[in-house]
Image: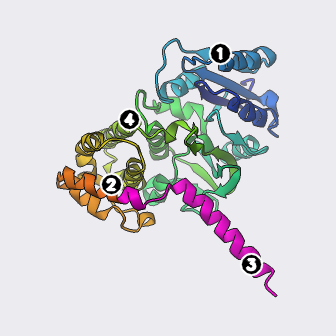
Amino acid sequence: MNKYKVSVIIPTFNTGDLLNDLFDSLLNQSLGFEDIEVIFVDDASSDQYTLDLINKFTSNYSNCKGVFLKVNSGFPGKPRNIGIKESSSDYVIFADHDDTYEKNTLEVLYDEITKKNADITISNFNQVIDGKIIPYKSYYEKNTEITDISKNKELLQISAAIWTRLFRKDFLIKNNIEFLEGMLAEDVYFAIKTSSYSSKIIYLAEFYGYNYNIRDSDNDKSTIHIRNKKYLEAMLNGYFEISKTLKNEKKEEYAKDVFKPHLTSWLYTLSISKTSDLEKKELFKKSISLYNDYYIEDPYFKGRYKKLVNYIKNNDLDLAIQEINKIKKSQKNINESLKENKFKKAFKYFKNKFKS
């Protein structure tokens, strides 16, 4: 029997103070911190404070382990893969350094996966923007047990949110499932692979176990919100690898469901980026085959990108640049809109509640 019930794998890179909140949320888990293995895989941080903090945790707690890469890989995939190999428990989960767990998260996920003999348990999550909590709205409103992904393709359209998913480790090893390395969309790839191979997934849509801290201001951005050409191209590279894998594994029937939210989201990200017109043109050129093969309009965006997608598909890239620049002028950052909508709903509620 393994010493620990769950291994929590945390890639780090110049995390600073943010890592303290995540670690505190692990210390206070109702599962019992003594039953949790914490593995930090540092991606060659240049910040001495981060390195000292990891060394402090590993020195003070026997269930904490630090792995230090000598060369920065640039993306989370490699550190997460190393974390899987270093883990010693039967179940693994992945956390981002600037987020936190609810107190009972690991206990709830562990109890579900063991009692129901599942390969994966998934919780829902809260989006946290400037301290304001906005629950993620999923396709599923009720807790759901999934044994056949072909009959539950909606699962492929929910947020990949790799940090909400507890995996049975021998299931990952048996199916040779690893994260993509050297590119983004590694979490989408991993979520698709695990979902398509799993014989049982428990999705706890009603349980909000993770707090996703969205840092998206000019002076403080999460890695995923650094919207430059490098990251936008790294996302495309991940999408192409997902497409290739689905074709090779004869699972292309899932492709349009997989790409439906992501291809539109990529356009949104590009539209609010600070990339030059030349960089946009290069990215559009690279993306043409993806939009021709897989694009389905995401109703959330209400047709906003219809013209733009047609220009991309037809290789009318100068017109595509004109169109995305028009969109940029009129489009708000989604995270800002989330905050505004939250406040509007609260105002409406209290106005009605206290109306004489």
Query: Label 2 vs label 4: CA separation?
Result: 22 Å
Between disc 2 and disc 4, the foreground one is 2
- Return the disc, 2 or 4, that comes first in the chain's sequence: 4
- Return the disc, 2 or 1, that comes first in the chain's sequence: 1
- Return the disc, 4 or 1, that comes first in the chain's sequence: 1
Q: Looking at the picture, tell me which residue is in the foreground, 336 or 171.
A: 336
Q: Of the numbered discs in the image, which one, if any, rests on residue 234? A: 4
- Return the disc, 2 or 3, that comes first in the chain's sequence: 2
Q: Which residue is mark 2?
A: 325
User: What residue do we see at 76% from left, 74% from top?
Assistant: 350
The answer to whether residue 267 shows anywhere in this view is: yes
Q: Secondary structure at mark 4?
A: helix
Q: Secondary structure at mark 3?
A: helix
Which segment did they paint magenta? 327-356
The residue type indicated by label 4 comes to Ala
The residue type indicated by label 1 comes to Gln
Between disc 2 and disc 1, the foreground one is 2
Q: Which residue is mark 3?
A: 351
The image quadrant where one finds the C terminus is bottom right
| Residue contact between numbered discs 2 and 4, judged by CB atoms under 8 Å | no
Query: Label 3 vs label 1: CA separation?
Result: 51 Å
User: What residue do we see at 46% from left, 25% from top?
Assistant: 74
- Return the disc, 3 or 4, that comes first in the chain's sequence: 4
Q: Magenta region's main secondary structure?
A: helix
- Return the disc, 3 or 1, that comes first in the chain's sequence: 1
Q: In the drawing, does residue 14 fall left or right of residue 37?
A: left
Q: Quadrant of residue 328?
A: bottom left
| Residue contact between numbered discs 2 and 3, judged by CB atoms under 8 Å | no
